[in-house]
Structure formats: C-alpha cells, structure tokens
Image (tube, rainbow, N blue to C red):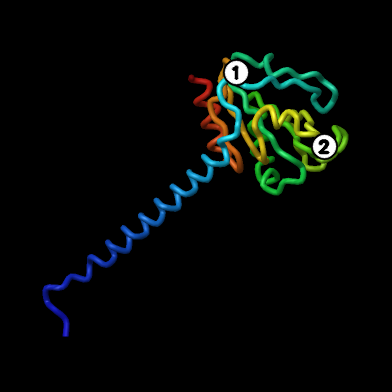
Amino acid sequence: MTDANSDPAPRPKRRRRGLLTDLLIVLLIFIGVQWYKSRPLASGDAPPLRGQLIGAEPFDLAQWRGQPVLVHFWATWCPVCKLEEATIDALSRDYAVITVALQSGSAAQVDAYLREQGRRFPVITDPYGEIATAWGVRGVPASFVLDGNGRIRFAAAGYDPGIALRGKLWAAARL
C-alpha cells in the first residue's frame, strides 16, 4: 500500500546531490594532493638556468626575458612524461619552452630518444639532478610558467594537461 502523498521525485534529487558531494570531495582531494606535491617547487624569481642544449648550443634562461616561458622537467624513463611529450612539443612551436631531462643519460642518449620519438623541443640534460634541486623538483614531470620578468607564476608537479599549460602561458603573458 502506497501513500498518496508520498512523492518519489526527491530520491533522484538526493542521488544527484550525493553525486555532486562525492565529486566535490574528490576534486578537493585532487587539489590538496597537487598542492602538497608542489610545495617544494621554486617560487618567486626563477633560479638561474644555464647549460648546453642538446646540439651543444649554450643556453641561458635570462636571454628569454620579456616573454612567457615554460620550463619543463621530464625524464626518458618516466611513463607520465611520455604522455606529455606531444603537448610539450606542440607548445614549443608557439611559446618559449626549455626542457630539462632529469637523470636520463648523456646528451647523445637523450638526443637519440628524442629522434626516436620524433620530438624537437629544446633540452638541457641534468644527469645528476643539480638543476632539478635548484628548482625544488623532486619528481617528474614538473612544469614552471614564468612571466616576462622571469618570475614563476605557476608551478605544478605531475601531469598538466596541454590546455592548462596553454592557459597558464597565456595568463603569464598578460601579467
């Protein structure tokens, strides 16, 4: 026997509210984890970044002042980095991008890897992690977006979707 005054409609509303609450909790946990992973990353003025690009050209980050820059730390042995490679390659065609290959072998080994993968982004090798340490990078991938004055505006540890990186570079150009 059912009550004529009972309304079955509130159940889907409660279900949706519960689903939204669950999604909000997952989102907050994700943001918290991202924040926790990014705590040791450098902030403020970017640390110096000088070295030899693969191909033996000298590189100094200070020469790129006046434009937004993506500094991206990665490794040939990192599966998550492999997911980002195409994005970093595409970004390097539209923006100033410098990448640092962390503990990935010699310049020749990294160059062979890039050729095999069909990638063309500029790379400095960091075989002993000295550059990564200066930037507070404890794991890869890690990305930094600098404004035209060389200040770090965005820093993230872990996977960063291409649209997010493009948005951060766009925003850094307007700061």
The label number, if any, that marks residue 110 in the structure image? 2
Label 1 or label 2, whichever comes before in sequence order? 2
Q: Amino acid at mark 1?
A: Gly
Q: Of residues 27 and 173, which is closer to you in this image?
A: 27
In this picture, residue 162 sits left or right of residue 29: right
**Left or right: where 8 falls relative to 127:** left
State the SS at label 2. helix
Q: Position of residue 64 (x, y in %)?
A: 66, 16
- Residue 61 position within the rendered picture, expressed as x and y whole percent measured from the top left: 69, 19
Image point (13%, 78%), residue name: 3
Number of other residues with Cα within 10 Å of mark 1, as a class: few under 14, some 14 to 19, many 20 or more: many
Residue 66 sits above or below residue 167 on the image: above
Q: Farthest left residue? A: 5
Picture residue at 78% right of the left edge, 22% below the top = 51
Say what secondary structure mark 1 lies in: loop
x and y percent of residue 165 in the render?
56, 34
Name the mark nearer the viewer: 1 or 2.
Answer: 1
Type of residue at label 2?
Val
Residue under pointer 1 = 150
The CA distance from mark 1 to mark 2 is 27 Å
